[in-house]
Image: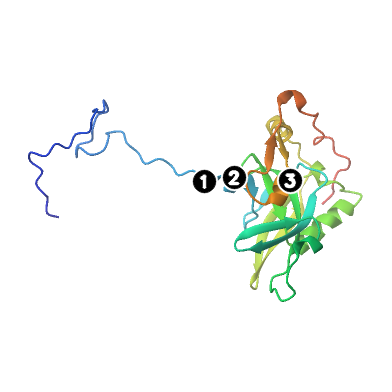
Amino acid sequence: METIKTEGLNLQNSPQSDKSISSNGFLPADYQLPQEKSAEKLTIFFKPSHEKVSVRILSSPAIMGWESWENRRCIRTRTFEEQKVPVDVTEKPRHFWAMKVFNRATNSIQLWVERDSKALQTMMELIQDPRCGNPIHYDLIVSTEVIGKKTITQIKPAALQPLNKEAIEMSNTFLLSEEAVFKGSGNPFVKVDKQNIAPSKFNQPENDCPF
């Protein structure tokens, strides 16, 4: 590549940096490109994938409602009737459960909004099984599977595993806001002052799920 002559051209910035410059004179000698940070929504929201992830539900009861999309805007309501969907619309509103979960893979508190009817049926069967009961007392192994053109959520109960102290503190510090869930945007968690934190109940299993 042909080099353009720059004799007589002042290329220095003002004020000059104290950092040493690399041999080509353009970059600091120790410069590295910063690592891109994931978008906030990717850390706040739990989205099942093909990889199996162990999560613990940390809110009870679940927040339930109906969800639809209009011009890329999420519309959540507590009842189907509130959706006011035209009769000729091709994609009907979907029933959802919204839950605060502890993701063991990322060691973080997240919001899980599940809409897959088969996944919800599986969870309901576990909850109604007297050997398992409320899922705040055991982990769920969550993944997805593509069948034909549909992606379905697979859910299996895991062996009883206590939550560590850090997970309990995070859960008690960040409460899930029902108002924010139905708003459908922004951070769904509300930070609680330490003096108002309630005692944990997540390591007090009612039953030992046998599956």
Type of residue at label 3? Glu
The residue positioned 32% from the left and 36% from the top of the image is 31
Q: SS class of the residue under badge 1?
A: loop
Type of residue at label 2? Thr
The first of marks 1 and 3 along the sequence is 1
Within 10 Å of the Cα at label 2, are there few (<14), some (14-19), or many (20+) other Cα atoms?
some
Q: Are marks 2 and 1 in contact (CB under 8 Å)?
A: yes
Q: Is residue 97 left or right of residue 132?
A: left
Residue 67 locus on image (x, y percent): 72, 60
Instruction: Kindly report the distance in space between the C-alpha atoms of the residues bearing marks 1 and 3.
Output: 25 Å
Residue 62 locus on image (x, y percent): 80, 48
Between tags 2 and 3, which lies in front?
3
The residue positioned 73% from the left and 71% from the top of the image is 86
Q: Is residue 80 visible?
A: no
Q: SS class of the residue under badge 2?
A: helix
- Which residue is label 3 attached to? 179
The image shows a total of numbered marks equal to 3
Instruction: Kindly report the distance in space between the C-alpha atoms of the residues bearing marks 2 and 3.
Output: 20 Å
- Which residue is label 1 attached to? 38
Residue closest to the eye, 85 or 196: 85
Residue closest to the eye, 195 or 199: 195
| Residue lying farthest to the right in this orientation | 130
Residue 142 locus on image (x, y percent): 70, 53
Quadrant into which the N terminus falls: bottom left
Q: Is residue 210 visible?
A: yes
Q: Are marks 1 and 3 in contact (CB under 8 Å)?
A: no
The residue positioned 73% from the left and 68% from the top of the image is 85
Residue closest to the eye, 204 or 44: 44
- Which residue is label 2 attached to? 43
Residue 41 locus on image (x, y percent): 59, 47
